Amino acid sequence: MKLAVIDANIFIDLIKLQMLSLLFSIDIEIFTTREIIDQLKDSQLEILKEFIDQGHLNVYLLTEEELEEVVNFSAPLSLDLADKSVAWLSIHIDAMVLSGDGPLRKFCESKKLEVRGIIWLFDTFLNKQLIIHAHAIEKMKQLLLINSRLPREECEKRIKEWLKT
C-alpha cells in the first residue's frame, strides 16, 4: 500500500469542504506528524480525532533524537519545524507528500520525493468514483473561494474538463 505524509493545509481544505472522509477511502496509508496536528485549530482537531481513533490517520510522534534530527535537517529558512517534520518523515518511511505549501513542495521535490496536492486528490476521488463530476465542480469552485494560494489556472482547467463529462 502506498504511504502519504500530509501537511496541515490539506487537512484544513478538506475539512472546510466537508470532504475529509474521502481522504481515508483512497487506498493510501495516511500519516502526519504531531507538529502538523499542533498547527490545527481545536475544531479541526476534533474532526480529525475520529480518524485517529479509528486507526485511519497515523500521527507520528518524534522521539527526542528524531526531533533533534528534524531541527537540524538542512532545509530553507522558509520551512518551519512542522514542514520539516513532513519532509523528514516522508524520507524515513518512503512516502509521498500531500501538501499545497509552495516552499515545502519545492523542497520535497528537490529531495526527489513524490509530491501531490489537493488537485491530485480531486482527480483521485473522481477516478475512484468517490464523487461525481458535478460534485467535484461545486467543491473546486468552493475551494477557489477559500484558498487563494491554489494554482487558479489548473483548477479552472479541471472544472472545464469536468463540465464536459
Image (tube, rainbow, N blue to C red):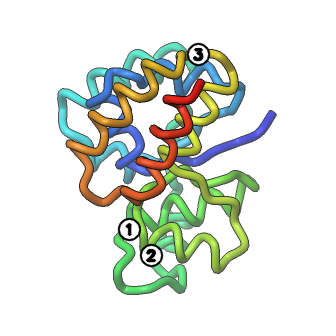
Label 3 Cα neighbours within 10 Å, binned few <14 / some 14-19 / many ≥20: some
Q: State the residue position of label 2.
A: 71
Residue drawn at point x = 52 percent, y = 13 percent: 54
Q: What label sits on residue 81 in the rendered view?
A: 1
Quarter of the N terminus within the rendering:
top right
Q: State the residue position of label 3.
A: 130
Say which quarter of the image contains residue 4.
top right
Which of discs 3 and 1 lies nearer the camera? The answer is: 3
Image vertical order of residue 114 relative to residue 161, above or below: below
- x and y percent of residue 98 in the render? 54, 50
Q: Considering the numbered disc 1 on the image, is that residue within a helix, a strand or a loop? A: helix
Residue drawn at point x = 55 percent, y = 38 percent: 161
Amino acid at dot 3? Leu
- Earlier-in-chain disc, 1 versus 2: 2
Between the residue at mark 3 and the residue at mark 1, the CA separation in whole angstroms equals 34 Å
- x and y percent of residue 18 in the render? 33, 21
Residue drawn at point x = 38 percent, y = 36 percent: 140
Q: Considering the numbered disc 2 on the image, is that residue within a helix, a strand or a loop? A: helix
Q: How many marks?
A: 3
